Image: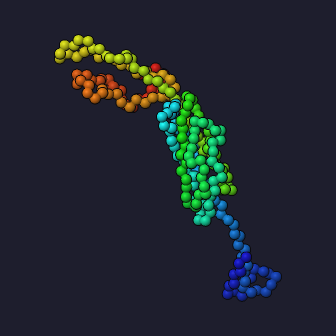
């Protein structure tokens, strides 16, 4: 405890003794624990083409918000279910100093169509939050686009100064997942006699099969 002496001779914290102006104050001293903070707690990749050339990437942050002098130890980090379509880096994290953080990169490379889920479990020396889970989600898709008619479009013989009847090209989607069409244009170097009409307002999303 801590003794406090004041100038008032009638002040005392012990009624069994004569007033002496002395107080005893009890002081409790405890260690402030490390504080693990993970954000965001959900990493959702949305729709990703199966077998991509490069995996989709997202990050989350692991922080120690404790005051100075209280380091945070990350005991382990790993996938809960071991879904092979997800990966992460770094695989190990050393102690995190107060006010510091580590960014963890999550990779998603779906190998089949359908929903994927897992959890990235982080265990630490924080006694209040010894384990925190980051929810992982994504969906593998494999849409297929088809044009009709295929090949060249033949307008036949057209008199100079006249306009040929327009030809319609249909774009059809099949397979799983939506496709967003951002633009449709003639390729560079196309003869100025050709033009496109009745184009939709872009972007256009093809969601259900046979949209076009």
Q: Quadrant of the N terminus?
A: bottom right
User: In x, y percent, where is residue 192?
Assistant: 22, 24
Identified at 78% across, 80% down, the residue is: 14
Front-most of 9 and 123? 123
Q: Is residue 118 above or below residue 14?
A: above
Q: Residue furthest top?
A: 157
Seen in the image, is 74 located left or right of residue 166? Answer: right
Q: Quadrant of the C terminus?
A: top left
Q: Is residue 30 above or below residue 161?
A: below
Identified at 29% across, 17% down, the residue is: 166
User: In x, y percent, where is residue 189?
Assistant: 26, 27
Identified at 33% across, 25% down, the residue is: 199
Seen in the image, is 17 located left or right of residue 37? Answer: right
Q: Residue furthest right?
A: 16
Front-most of 64 and 110? 110
Q: Is residue 40 visible?
A: no
Seen in the image, is 191 located left or right of residue 176? Answer: left
Task: Give the mark count.
Answer: 0
The quarter of the picture where residue 99 lies is: bottom right
Q: Is residue 111 visible?
A: yes
Q: Is residue 80 above or below residue 65?
A: above
Seen in the image, is 59 located left or right of residue 17? Answer: left
The quarter of the picture where residue 32 lies is: bottom right
User: In x, y percent, where is residue 137?
Assistant: 57, 38
Identified at 22% across, 17% down, the residue is: 163
């Amino acid at each position: 405890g801590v003794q406090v002496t004041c100038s008032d001779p009638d002040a005392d914290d012990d009624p069994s003794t004569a007033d002496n102006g002395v107080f005893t104050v009890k002081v409790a001293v405890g260690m402030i624990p490390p504080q693990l903070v993970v954000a965001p707690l959900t990493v959702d990749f949305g729709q990703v083409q199966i077998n991509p050339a490069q995996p989709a990437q997202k990050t989350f942050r692991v922080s120690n918000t404790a005051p100075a002098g209280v380091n945070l130890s990350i005991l382990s980090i790993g996938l809960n279910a071991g879904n092979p379509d997800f990966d992460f880096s770094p695989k190990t994290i050393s102690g995190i100093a107060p006010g510091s953080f580590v960014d963890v990169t999550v990779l998603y490379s779906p190998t089949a169509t359908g929903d994927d889920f897992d959890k990235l479990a982080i265990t630490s020396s924080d006694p209040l939050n010894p384990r925190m889970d980051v929810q992982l989600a994504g969906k593998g898709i494999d849409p297929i686009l088809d044009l009709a008619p295929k090949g060249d479009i033949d307008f036949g013989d057209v008199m100079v100064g006249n306009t040929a009847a327009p030809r319609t090209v249909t774009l059809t989607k099949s397979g799983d997942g939506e496709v967003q069409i951002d633009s449709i244009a003639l390729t560079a170097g196309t003869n100025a006699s050709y033009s496109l009409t009745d184009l939709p307002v872009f972007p256009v999303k093809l969601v259900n099969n046979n949209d076009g």
